[in-house]
Structure formats: structure tokens, C-alpha cells
């Protein structure tokens, strides 16, 4: 990581982690003052996973996300204005207020969708990978999901099929330690989740999910393999959900000292401690991100609520011939 | 006209659409070298290859969800869930994903896929291989549902479903696969039967019977009998239950003043109650008798033929129900 190119990658990664962090902090502010309807599943603490993984992708690749999906979408380059407007339920949001925080999609960026059902996106991502194979492209799918989803049946069904048919998909378990309020170690005997790969005859690796470069290198290898037709990989990124399950959850069930330990391993802090970027450059990035976030919040605040006559629109596709 | 087996009409529909459009592929249980559970895709694996006629493991959530992912990325998958009952295993993918993605995305994403499945009482397949779950799937906004009653509609509806930009569930009847029906000759103009359009298969002025799938054929036989006695029974084949062609039903009931709804599904909370109430404001003053229904009673489908025959809306029960209303 010495060249000018790698320097620009590091700068982009730092900016993206900050972008996610600041975006989520503003989401939480909107939530706390009642301006964000519904549930706020924050990605704070897990920024290095989405950032490192999506940095590997090409523009024509696909990503599938989860209920805790803002980070994946931002890392994939989603429009912050349209995201924040959607999260506030406004007309100018990605889904015109029909989907909200858990259902943001953008096919122009290959974002197959966040998903309100834990594990619901895993087969969809696997089907997109089949589609890449079918169409004879060398596109790759990144499929994000949590430790919670790794105990859903769709995990098993999808990995089995992707392995059987060498599909170009990389499964990324964001092990943030908790499924809602339950620690993964209380409901699973084998805590090394990447070992499950062996059951499907595919490669599995566990990495420090708070180290953005560790994530980047693991995903890079997996994506290269997938693109070369060598099939799927299972990557467990060990990270931590610094907030509760959603905005209402204060995380009182955590062990004493647990949060403090993980805060000392905060992904943005770890990055800054490495001195990849000098302090002045970091400050420039911060100022740039701050301006983007301010702009997105302003846009969302000023966007109108969806008109009542839009209620029944879009149940079926009205956009003409699809190909 | 020519006489063909229903299973061959289904195969023709899939074959013609696959030949016409390279984005069409088939996946599901026994879709590969076996040529379909009822041989309804025989020869297509040899013709189109393994990638386009894909045998899946018995992972209904997995392959229905995969079909959604294919549909979002430029393909037109035709998935097969062997029996309606097995759709329940994949219900999240059907009801939460396939049905809702278009709306949740603010209308930006079409989900052009077909899910073929089957119903059919009378084969002693018991409570988990015989259910008619049309009412269950019809409950969810975002799905279109076609229910053919013969080879012609099986072919015409399936071809339309494959070309549609929304998710369509096509509910075939396994009693039909080995039965022969009339079909237009090959080489004649292809028939695309629109979704959401019912058909009047037998005209009559005294009572309207509305049904779908196999009971339509039973109703037609009963109507032919009544005709000999000078009683006109109008038989309407729904063909689709979502969208529901209320207009055709309303027009007929305004003429006959009497409506009997016949369905193989469970009686309570089924499609018959829904149809009756949805047309009521339009026909209330035209009715000469209360709208009645004949369905399978609210009991899991029993195994023994001696018991199963008691729940099927057969000719005797339909005849009796009509007589009571005249």
C-alpha cells in the first residue's frame, strides 16, 4: 500500500467509513426527535466490512443487503440524498416512501435490495449469481448478512446450490455478535462461523471485520476466484454492533466491559491509528464528508411527503417492457 | 383442432417461449433429465441443456428466492414447486419477496417470473400433497394467479405468464396431465390468453356457476345434463383469480339472478366468499336467491378414498346445490 493508487484507495475507504458513520449518526438524530418513522437499525461499528468489501467490486457487480443495510448501500455508492429521503419516508426517496430504511434498492448500482427478512436476501443474491453465469458475464455478487441470518434455512439452501454449481457469489457474514438481543455464542456451539464452508466444500475464512484492509484483501481474493469461475467463498467478518438492535434498544444485555472493549477497536479509530493518511488529509476528508451529510439531510428534510394518490401505484410494474 | 395430452400443451408453452426468448429458463424439482414430475417438460433438457433446464435440490425457499434474483437481473425464470403444499415451505420468498419487491422499490423493479405448481383432489395424496392454497396466495397484493382448467388455457395462460413483467403463479391440476383435450392445430396463430379474464364456457339464463381448475369440467358436465331438462346453467371459468374478472361474473349474474360458486379449496376464508362479497354491491338488486357456495369442507384432506371422495365437489353435489337454488 505505497503507490499513489493505493493511497487514493485508502483515502476513499476512510471517506466511506466516515460517510457511513456520520450518516447513521444523523439517522439516529432524526429517529430520536421523531422525524424518522419506523425502525432504525444502525450500522455504526461495522463500517469496515461494507467499505472493505465493496471497494473490491466493479461497477457492474451486484450487492445484496439486509435490514441493517445503510452501510452497504453507501459503500456501493448510493445517493445519500435519496437514501435519507427514503429513510424519512419522503417522496424523493429511492422508493418514493414505499420501502423505507429496510427496503432501499437501486438497480443502476446493482443493489438488489436491503431486506426486512433476516436471511431473505441470500437466495436472491444466489439467483443473481446464477444469472451472471447464465448470461455468460464475469460479474460477481456480494451477499451481506449477519450472524443471525447464518442460522436461517436460506443460508444452507443457498450455499449448497452456489457450491454445487460454482456460482460467482461471495457470502459475507457480518458477525456483529448479536441476533436482536441474543449473543451468537448462546445459540451456536461452533463460534468460528467460517468453518461452515467446509460442509459445502467451499473456501471459508474469518477475518477481523474492524480492519478495513483485512476485509478488503479477503474479499478481493474471493471475488477474483468467483470471477474466474472457481465458485463461492464464505467470509466471516468479526465485528461489533455498537448500538442496540434498533433505535429503541439500549443494549442493556451486554456483558460488562464488552462495549468498551469494542469501542477501543472501533474501525475508524483503528484506521486512524495506522497513520495511512496524514492528519491534514484526514481533516480534509472529514470536511468533505460533513458537507455531503449536511446536504443529504437538508434534501431529505425539504422533500415532500408522498401524495395520497401514490398509495396504490407500483404494486405491479408499470415501466413498460423489461429486459 | 387436434387432441393432445395436457402435459404436452404445458410443454409446448414452455418450449415455444424458451425458443422465442433466450432469457427464459426453467428450474425446480425434477425439471432436468426426468422431464418433469408428470413428464410435462420431457425432452426440453436434451434440447436446451442443463443451464436452462435446471434440476434443483429440494430447497423450495432457495430456488424460489433464486428465481427472484434471476428475475431482478434480466432473466425470466419459470420455477416449479411440485405441489401447492410445498409453497408453504417457501412462503417468505413468495409472499414477502416475490410479491412485494416491485412495490417496496417504489415501482422501479419488475419481477418477471413464473412459479408453476399443482393442485388436485382425488389421488389419495392426503393432507400435505393435495391442498388447494389458491386463497392463501391470492391474499397477497402483488401476485397474479392463473388457474387453467384444460390444455388450451394451460398453454395460453402459461405463455402469457412467462411474458408478463410481474410474478405470476400458475396453478396446474395434476389430474389433467394425463388427460386429453382439444387444442388448436400447430401452425395456427398462437394463443395468448390474457391474465385477469374469465371465460363463459357454457351459456344459460337460469343460474350462473363460477369455478376454476378441475371443478369447471365437472360443472360443464352438470350444465349439459340440466340443458336436457331445459334449464340453462351458465358456466364461467375464472382462468385467473388475480386479477379477478368481476365484470364477466357480474354481467352473467345480472342475467341469471342466481350464483353458485364452486371451488376445491377449503370453504372458510376462501376465494368463494371473496368473490361473493366483492360483486355484491353490483348484483344485490338482481339476485333471485342468496349466493351459495360449494367447496371442500374445513377439514385437512383425508387419505382414504372412502373419506376423500366425501369432500370433492363432484357432479352429485353440484347438481344438488343447483337444484336447491332453482
Image (cartoon, rainbow, N blue to C red):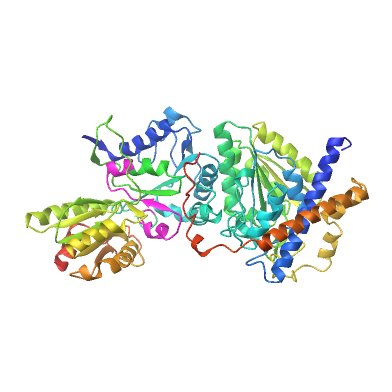
Residue at 71 percent of width and 70 percent of height: A32
Locate the N terminus of chain B and report the quarter of the image it occupies. top left
Locate the C terminus of chain B and report the quarter of the image it occupies. bottom left
> Whole-percent x and y of residue A234?
68, 44
Q: Nearer the viewer, residue A205 or A222?
A: A222
Q: Is residue A249 visible?
A: no
- In the image, taking residue B179 as reference, residue A129 lies left or right, namely right
- In the image, taking residue A282 as reference, residue B142 lies left or right, namely left
Extreme residue toward the top, this view:
B47
Q: Nearer the viewer, residue B206 or A240?
A: B206
In reply to whether residue A303 is colored magenta, the answer given is no
> Whole-percent x and y of residue B108?
54, 49
Q: Nearer the viewer, residue B76 or A322?
A: A322
In reply to whether residue B148 is colored magenta, the answer given is yes
Residue at 40 percent of width and 56 percent of height: B128
Q: Is residue B322 visible?
A: yes
Read off the magenta span: B129-156
> Whole-percent x and y of residue A70?
69, 55
Task: Give the quadrant of residue A93.
Answer: bottom right
> Whole-percent x and y of residue B251?
23, 59
- In the image, taking residue B122 as reference, residue B65 lies left or right, namely right
Amino acid at each position: 500500500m505505497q503507490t499513489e493508487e493505493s493511497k487514493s484507495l485508502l483515502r476513499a475507504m476512510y471517506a466511506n467509513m466516515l460517510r457511513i458513520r456520520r450518516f447513521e449518526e444523523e439517522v439516529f438524530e432524526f429517529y430520536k426527535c421523531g422525524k424518522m418513522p419506523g425502525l432504525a437499525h444502525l450500522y455504526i461499528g461495522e463500517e469496515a466490512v461494507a467499505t472493505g468489501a465493496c471497494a473490491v467490486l466493479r461497477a457492474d457487480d451486484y450487492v445484496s443487503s439486509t435490514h441493517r443495510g445503510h452501510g452497504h448501500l453507501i459503500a456501493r455508492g448510493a445517493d445519500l440524498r435519496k437514501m435519507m429521503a427514503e429513510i424519512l419516508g419522503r417522496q424523493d426517496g429511492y422508493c418514493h416512501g414505499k420501502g423505507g430504511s429496510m427496503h432501499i434498492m437501486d438497480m443502476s448500482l446493482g443493489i438488489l435490495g436491503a431486506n426486512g427478512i433476516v436471511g431473505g436476501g441470500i437466495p436472491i443474491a444466489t439467483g443473481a449469481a446464477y444469472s451472471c453465469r447464465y448470461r455468460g458475464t464475469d460479474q460477481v455478487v456480494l451477499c451481506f448478512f449477519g450472524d443471525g441470518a447464518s442460522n436461517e434455512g436460506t443460508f444452507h439452501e443457498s450455499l449448497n446450490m452456489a457450491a454445487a454449481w460454482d456460482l460467482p457469489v461471495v457470502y459475507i457474514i457480518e458477525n456483529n455478535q448479536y441476533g436482536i438481543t441474543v449473543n451468537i455464542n448462546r445459540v451456536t456451539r461452533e463460534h468460528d462461523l467460517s468453518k461452515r464452508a467446509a460442509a459445502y466444500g467451499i473456501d471459508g475464512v474469518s477475518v477481523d471485520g474492524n480492519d478495513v484492509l483485512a476485509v478488503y484483501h479477503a474479499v478481493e481474493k474471493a471475488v477474483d476466484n468467483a470471477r474466474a469461475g472457481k465458485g463461492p467463498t464464505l467470509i466471516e467478518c468479526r465485528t461489533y454492533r455498537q448500538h442496540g438492535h434498533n433505535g429503541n434498544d439500549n443494549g442493556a444485555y451486554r456483558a460488562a466491559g464488552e462495549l468498551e472493549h469494542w469501542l477501543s477497536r472501533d474501525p475508524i479509530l483503528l484506521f486512524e491509528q495506522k497513520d495511512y493518511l496524514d492528519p491534514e488529509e484526514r481533516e480534509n476528508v472529514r470536511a468533505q464528508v460533513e458537507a455531503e451529510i449536511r446536504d443529504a439531510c437538508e434534501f431529505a428534510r425539504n422533500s415532500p411527503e408522498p401524495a395520497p394518490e401514490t398509495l396504490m401505484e407500483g404494486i405491479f410494474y408499470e415501466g413498460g417492457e423489461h429486459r | 383442432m387436434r387432441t393432445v395430452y395436457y402435459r404436452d400443451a404445458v410443454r409446448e408453452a414452455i418450449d415455444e417461449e424458451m425458443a422465442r426468448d433466450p432469457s427464459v429458463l426453467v428450474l425446480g424439482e425434477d425439471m432436468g433429465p426426468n422431464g418433469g414430475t408428470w413428464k410435462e417438460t420431457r425432452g426440453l433438457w436434451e434440447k436446451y441443456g442443463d443451464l436452462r433446464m435446471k434440476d434443483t435440490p429440494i430447497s423450495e425457499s432457495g430456488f424460489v428466492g433464486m428465481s427472484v434474483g434471476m428475475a431482478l437481473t434480466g432473466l425470466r425464470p419459470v420455477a416449479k414447486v411440485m405441489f401447492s403444499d410445498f409453497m408453504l415451505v417457501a412462503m417468505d420468498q413468495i409472499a414477502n419477496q416475490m410479491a412485494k419487491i416491485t412495490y417496496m422499490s417504489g415501482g422501479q423493479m419488475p419481477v418477471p417470473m413464473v412459479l408453476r405448481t399443482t393442485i388436485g383432489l382425488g389421488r389419495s395424496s392426503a393432507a400435505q400433497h393435495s391442498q388447494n392454497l389458491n386463497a392463501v396466495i391470492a391474499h397477497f397484493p402483488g401476485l397474479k394467479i392463473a388457474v387453467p382448467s384444460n390444455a388450451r388455457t394451460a398453454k395460453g395462460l402459461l405463455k402469457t405468464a412467462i411474458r408478463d413483467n410481474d410474478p405470476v403463479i400458475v396453478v396446474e391440476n395434476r389430474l389433467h396431465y394425463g388427460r386429453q383435450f382439444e387444442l388448436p392445430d400447430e401452425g395456427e396463430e398462437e394463443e395468448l390468453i390474457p391474465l385477469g379474464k374469465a371465460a363463459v364456457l357454457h351459456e344459460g339464463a337460469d343460474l350462473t356457476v363460477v369455478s376454476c381448475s378441475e371443478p369447471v369440467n365437472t360443472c360443464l358436465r352438470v350444465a349439459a345434463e340440466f340443458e336436457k331438462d331445459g334449464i340453462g346453467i351458465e358456466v364461467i371459468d375464472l382462468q385467473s383469480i388475480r386479477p379477478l374478472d368481476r365484470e364477466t361474473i357480474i354481467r352473467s349474474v345480472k342475467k341469471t339472478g342466481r350464483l353458485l360458486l364452486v371451488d376445491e379449496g377449503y370453504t372458510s376464508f376462501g376465494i368463494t366468499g371473496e368473490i361473493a362479497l366483492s360483486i355484491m354491491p353490483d348484483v344485490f338488486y338482481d339476485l333471485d336467491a342468496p349466493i351459495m357456495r360449494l367447496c371442500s369442507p374445513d377439514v385437512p384432506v383425508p387419505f382414504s378414498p372412502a373419506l376423500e371422495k366425501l369432500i370433492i365437489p363432484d357432479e352429485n353435489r353440484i347438481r344438488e346445490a343447483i337444484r336447491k337454488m332453482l
